[in-house]
Image: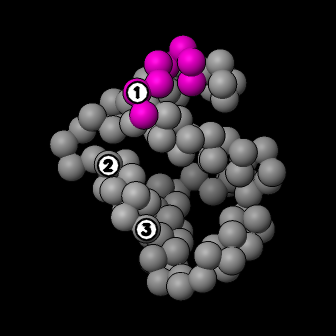
């Protein structure tokens, strides 16, 4: 088994990282951690996904977002659907970001 394909092991790793991020008190530590974990391209994609949520929240059209960030309409639609869900984690994070 060359690649790790055990879903339970993958979930355990994700849960560990979620907990560590929740405990981290320093933005610089999280930034350094992400810099070690992800390539520049992956970080760019990660940031664009958050930016698209911000743009949806502002009322920017999906086509405008796609053009602005060079993101597929599929990703934007997914973000829009997630934002509309009751008890949306996107909504909670936007509220958290806006409270700072």
Residue at the spot of label 2: 91
Does residue 61 show up magenta in the picture? Answer: yes
Residue at the spot of label 1: 59
Residue at the spot of label 3: 100
Q: Nearer the viewer, residue 88 or 65?
A: 65
* Residue at x 78% of width, y 44% of height: 41
Disc 2 crowd rating (10 Å Cα; few below 14, some 14-19, many 20+) is some
* Residue at x 63% of width, y 47% of height: 47
What coloring was used for the rendering?
one colour
Query: Marks 2 and 3: which is nearer the front?
Result: 3
Disc 1 crowd rating (10 Å Cα; few below 14, some 14-19, many 20+) is few
Element class at badge 1: loop
User: Taking 36 as reference, is 100 left or right?
Assistant: left
* Residue at x 33% of width, y 56% of height: 95
In the picture, the quarter occupied by the C terminus is: bottom left
C-alpha span from label 1 to label 2 = 14 Å
Q: Picture coordinates of residue 7 (x, y %)?
A: 47, 55
Element class at badge 2: helix
Q: Earlier in the sequence, mark 1 or mark 2?
A: 1
* Residue at x 67% of width, y 41% of height: 45
- Vertical position of residue 22 compared to residue 87: above or below: below
Element class at badge 3: loop
């Amino acid at each position: 088994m060359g690649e790790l394909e055990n879903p339970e092991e993958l979930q355990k790793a994700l849960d560990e990282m979620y907990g560590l991020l929740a405990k981290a008190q320093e933005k610089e530590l999280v930034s350094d951690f992400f810099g070690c974990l992800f390539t520049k391209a992956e970080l760019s994609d990660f940031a664009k996904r958050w930016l698209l949520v911000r743009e949806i929240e502002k009322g920017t059209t999906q086509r405008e977002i796609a053009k602005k960030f060079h993101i597929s309409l599929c990703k934007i639609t997914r973000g829009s659907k997630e934002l509309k869900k009751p008890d949306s984690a996107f909504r909670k994070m936007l509220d958290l970001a806006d409270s700072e």
